[in-house]
Image (cartoon, rainbow, N blue to C red):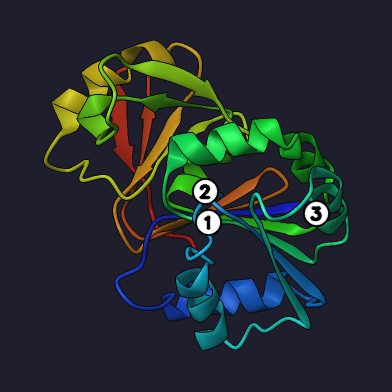
Amino acid sequence: MKIHYYLGWFTEYFPVKLEKSLKEDIMERKSLVMISSMPTTHELDGSTEREWLDHAGIKFDEYHLINYRVQKEDAQSLIQNASAIFLLGGDTVEQNAFLKEYGLADAIRQSGAVVLGASAGAINMSAKWLCSRKFGYDVEESNLYEGIGLGNFSVLSHFDLENNIEMVRSELALLLEELPVYASNKDCALRVKGDHLDILGDVYLIARSEIKKLDETL
């Protein structure tokens, strides 16, 4: 049964409940494959996300970073053999373009590995997501982007929803005609295992005109 984690960003390390869940879910730890959100910048190597996992006691035999230094064919092979796949945080638009250029979305969808995404990575795991200046993107016009589509919903990650509810409702109107949106602030996570969804932290479900805060289950 496939397991996916949609993570926000964390003040320090993973909360204890999240660490416990990840330990139980990531049973095989041969290879962690990280996918860059800024593949032209080699200094961004996922050290923060790796530190979260290290602190949780989740260590792998091999660590691989996919960026432009890795050939497309090698990137596909790394994903096929991964125990866990981590889409790193950073530049959502740049990571989205890189996923398409390297044809990684199909490989990730077909993988049996546990898939994690933090911030930009979580957003790109969505079926679709909204790129909007009001959400912090440097764009003139709002656009819908196709994500990997691991679940039939969208994610708005570590956004200050509580103080911007009406703006968010208005801005997401077009996307909400197609998909529900899970919006979270920092130190939050969604865990999806098959058809079951678990919540950690302050996460809201936005569907059409309704905004509902979800109970923690993790």
- Classify 10 Å Cα crowding around label 2: few (below 14), some (14-19), many (20 and above): many
Q: Position of residue 30 (x, y in %)?
A: 82, 77
Q: Counting residues from the N terminus, which is met first, the one under dot 2 or under dot 3?
A: 3
Q: Which residue is mark 1?
A: 88
Judge from the rendering whether residue 73 lies leftward or rightward of residue 210; answer left or right. Answer: right
Q: Residue at x 55, y 35 (%)?
A: 96
Q: Counting residues from the N terminus, which is met first, the one under dot 2 or under dot 1?
A: 1
Q: Give me the C-alpha separation between circle 1 and circle 3.
A: 14 Å
The three-letter amino acid code for the residue at tag 3 is Ile
Q: Position of residue 32 (x, y in %)?
A: 72, 69
The foreground one among 122 and 198 is 122
Q: Secondary structure at mark 1?
A: loop
Judge from the rendering whether residue 59 lies leftward or rightward of residue 172; answer left or right. Answer: right
- Classify 10 Å Cα crowding around label 3: few (below 14), some (14-19), many (20 and above): many
Q: Residue at x 52, y 56 (%)?
A: 88
Q: Which residue is mark 3?
A: 79
